[in-house]
Image (cartoon, rainbow, N blue to C red):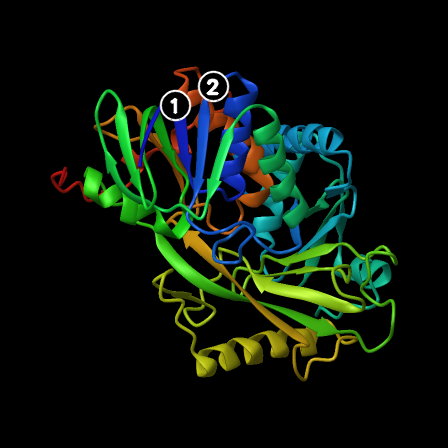
């Protein structure tokens, strides 16, 4: 069925970035259509689950700057939603063994962002967090302002507010084809839409939509496991006891694990790999439609995490995770996002490759993508996020 209504912008993909983009556009008076291929809510992409960390601690200072604006935007969204979606000042403990080079760069970014933190020598680390066990070559930074986003509530708030601002949300409606032109025609499984601008925020399905319009990005959709491990003594590593979020940034440890204090499930600590993980088994490439599952691979991941917990979190039961969940990461080679216009069709904009650290930055990435669609000057330097940094495949458009 063809729609007679012409939209200013269509956003494809209602994850956190797509929903943030659509919300911002609608708030600016743009007639906006948000399309999601799966019925909402769903667990097929990268924006599901209950929690995400929001933190200033980045090696790259441009991300720390973006986090500052994103934090203010989340507070605005929270106020309008009239429910808590951001738990503030939980803290982030970043540990690093050996050289400490990454911690030095994180300190520079925190200083530039004006974020407060404590540097903890190994002795101070042991005194401050006796429930952890790290050998003498480890030191740490404790960022005070880091918090926890209630991810599922964040996503629902974004989508509800998009509709309140006058946007049109259609879920269970996948995009089949994008036909470029001064008016872009979008064919879905149910309808035909005409729009002035289209923004593709389709996560691991991005290249399936972009290839027919002449571009393939170096995106790697990966499956990652998230585990919840029981504590041996009630209250240990809990949010209520003041235990912070956690990240091991040791260069020589390819696991790059993060953790959240027990909060989602009573007396269970959440562990998972970041997008910086360099173990192929831990983040293995998948077809997002196939959702391949390999029990042997999963067992190797459990064993790797088990060994880490046994050495460094002695008050967790390391034998078996109590709960196993999965997520899809869409990684770029340099772990930087793609926030840019199509090199040939300027009314097709792409937001992709959020590399397992994009949720916290959803509102500011959405604002940037909306600014590109409205031909406004973005509020952040987009040099790190340009498509031109890749030697992208640009086959002739099939349309």
Where does residue 132 sit, x and y in percent of width and height?
Answer: 77, 68
Examine the image and state in which quarter residue 248 appears: bottom right
Where does residue 201 sit, x and y in percent of width and height?
Answer: 41, 40
Q: Residues within 10 Å of mark 1 (few under 14, many from 20)?
A: many
The structure residue drawn at horizontal position 87% and vertical position 56%, both measured from the top left corner, is 240
Rendered-image quadrant of the C terminus: top left
Provide the secondary structure element on which disc 1 rests. strand
In-image side of 377 versus 126 (left or right): left
Q: Nearer the viewer, mark 1 or mark 2?
A: 1
Give me the C-alpha separation between circle 1 and circle 2.
Answer: 8 Å
Please tell me the numbered disc located at residue 7. Answer: 1
Q: Count the labels in the image.
A: 2
Q: Residues within 10 Å of mark 2 (few under 14, many from 20)?
A: some
Q: Nearer the viewer, residue 98 or 397?
A: 397
The structure residue drawn at horizontal position 21% and vertical position 28%, both measured from the top left corner, is 344
Q: Is residue 103 above or below residue 168?
A: below
Q: Is residue 57 visible?
A: no
Q: Is residue 28 visible?
A: yes
Rendered-image quadrant of the N terminus: top left
The structure residue drawn at horizontal position 88% and vertical position 58%, both measured from the top left corner, is 241
The structure residue drawn at horizontal position 57% and vertical position 30%, both measured from the top left corner, is 162
Q: Which residue is mark 2?
A: 30
In-image side of 256 versus 149 (left or right): left
């Amino acid at each position: 069925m063809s729609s007679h209504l012409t939209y200013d912008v269509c956003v494809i993909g209602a994850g956190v970035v797509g929903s943030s983009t659509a919300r911002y556009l609608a708030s600016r008076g743009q007639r906006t259509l948000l399309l999601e291929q799966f019925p909402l809510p769903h667990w097929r992409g990268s924006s599901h689950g209950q929690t995400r960390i929001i933190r200033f601690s980045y090696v790259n200072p441009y991300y720390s700057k973006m986090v500052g604006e994103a934090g203010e935007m989340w507070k605005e969204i929270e106020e309008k939603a009239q429910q808590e979606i951001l738990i503030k000042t939980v803290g982030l403990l970043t540990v690093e063994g050996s050289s400490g080079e990454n911690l030095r760069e994180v300190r520079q970014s925190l200083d530039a962002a004006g974020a407060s933190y404590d540097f903890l020598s190994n002795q101070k680390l042991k005194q401050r967090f006796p429930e952890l066990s790290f050998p003498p070559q480890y030191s740490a930074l404790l960022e005070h302002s880091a918090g926890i986003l209630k991810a599922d509530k964040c996503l629902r708030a974004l989508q509800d507010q998009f509709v309140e601002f006058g946007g049109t949300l259609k879920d269970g409606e996948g995009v089949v084809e994008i036909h470029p032109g001064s008016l872009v025609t979008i064919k879905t499984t149910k309808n035909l839409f005409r729009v002035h601008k289209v923004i593709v925020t389709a996560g691991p399905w991005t290249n399936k939509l972009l290839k027919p319009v002449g571009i393939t990005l170096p995106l790697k959709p990966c499956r990652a496991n998230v585990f919840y491990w029981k504590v041996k003594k009630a209250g240990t590593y809990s949010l209520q006891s003041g235990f912070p979020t956690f990240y091991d940034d040791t260069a020589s440890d390819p696991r790059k694990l993060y953790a959240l204090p027990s909060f989602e499930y009573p007396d269970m600590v959440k562990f998972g790999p970041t997008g910086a993980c360099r173990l192929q088994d831990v983040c293995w490439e998948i077809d997002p439609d196939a959702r391949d599952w390999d029990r042997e691979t999963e067992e190797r991941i459990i064993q790797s995490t088990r060994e880490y917990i046994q050495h460094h979190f002695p008050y967790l039961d390391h034998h078996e995770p109590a709960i196993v969940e999965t997520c899809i990461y869409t990684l770029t080679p340099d772990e930087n996002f793609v926030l840019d216009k199509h090199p040939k069709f300027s009314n097709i904009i792409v937001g992709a490759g959020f590399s397992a650290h994009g949720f916290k930055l959803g509102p500011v990435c959405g604002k940037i993508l909306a600014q590109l669609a409205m031909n406004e000057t973005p509020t952040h330097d987009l040099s790190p996020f340009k498509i031109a940094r890749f030697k992208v495949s640009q086959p002739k458009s099939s349309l």
